[in-house]
Image (tube, helix red, strand yellow):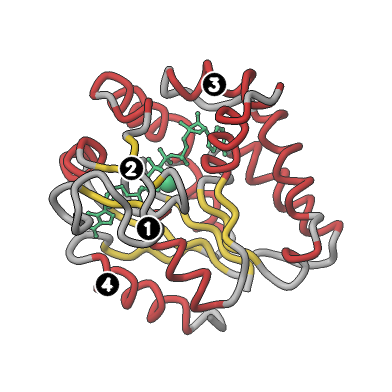
Amino acid sequence: MRLVLVGPPGAGKGTQAEFIAAHLSVPKISTGDIFRANVAEGTPLGMQARKYMDAGQLVPDEVTINMVRARLAEPDAAHGFLLDGFPRTVPQAEALDEMLSTMGVGLDVVLELVVDDDEVIRRLSGRRTSHGCGRIWHIEFDPPQREGICDRCGEKLFQREDDRAETVAERLRVYARDTAPLIDFYGAQGKLVGIDATGPVEDVTLRAIDALQSYGG
Ligand code: AP5
Ligand code: MG
């Protein structure tokens, strides 16, 4: 299955991507994670992306599209994938359609995770991420057993640079301006399905899997 997850910052895309990708046996491709790995390694791509990320703005389309094109050409993406955080602009969505049509395939479905801004702010202010395995936690809604330590890999947790309140507000503005138009874009293609992404993580996963069933997932 070829699937895109869309939704505002903090909607739970990364959290759900883990479970849904495992359920569908497809690779999870998160552009935010790829950029953060490049920032951590100090690569030229990371140095270029960092200034946009720290300001809560989008990395330019050309840079992002080239990165995704290279990732989708890897063998593990040949039979399906889950994209988390891409596309996030209409030009990115058009570029994705083009890339896939060159490969002779198309997207099956775009799953929108629906949450309101107040919930986003509660989620992002308490988010912690594992340095070791990338598992996403929340200090209140999904806490690890030992504070600051990942239950899964035993490494320390960190707080993302872009989860500061001012940056979150900018990310929400950017989402409304640049990414929300994708809802109409994919709605017009008949590929959009939205689910309520509030409530316990497991309930959201079940809703997602249920919604994907009618698309062959
Ligand atoms: P990216 O990493 O994609 O960030 P984002 O879209 O802002 O989304 P987040 O990762 O913040 O949230 P999420 O929806 O994954 O939520 P999560 O599961 O973590 O992008 C970062 C930056 O990279 C961008 O700003 C941009 O600069 C750049 N970038 C990336 N892609 C780009 C692109 N295509 N074009 C240009 N630039 C790009 O959950 C959040 C918290 O909530 C966690 O603590 C979690 O435990 C908790 N939680 C999850 N589900 C629930 C639940 N059901 N109930 C309670 N808590 C929950
Ligand atoms: Mg994420």
Q: Which amino acid, mark 1?
A: Thr
The residue pinned by badge 1 equals: 15
Q: Residue at x 51, y 46 (%)?
A: 85
Q: Which amino acid, mark 2?
A: Leu
The residue pinned by badge 4 equals: 202
Percent of width and height locating residue 18: 45, 64
Q: Which amino acid, mark 3?
A: Arg
- Gap in angstroms between the C-alphas marked 4 and 1: 10 Å
Is 214 situated above or below 193? below
Asked if the residue at label 1 sits under 8 Å from ligand 1, the reply is yes
Report the disc number at residue 157.
Answer: 2
Q: Residues within 10 Å of mark 2 (few under 14, many from 20)?
A: many
Percent of width and height locating residue 182: 51, 46
Q: Residue at x 34, y 37 (%)?
A: 158
- Gap in angstroms between the C-alphas marked 3 and 1: 23 Å
Q: Which numbered disc flags the more N-terminal residue, 3 or 1?
A: 1
Percent of width and height locating residue 173: 35, 27
**Element carrying mark 1:** helix
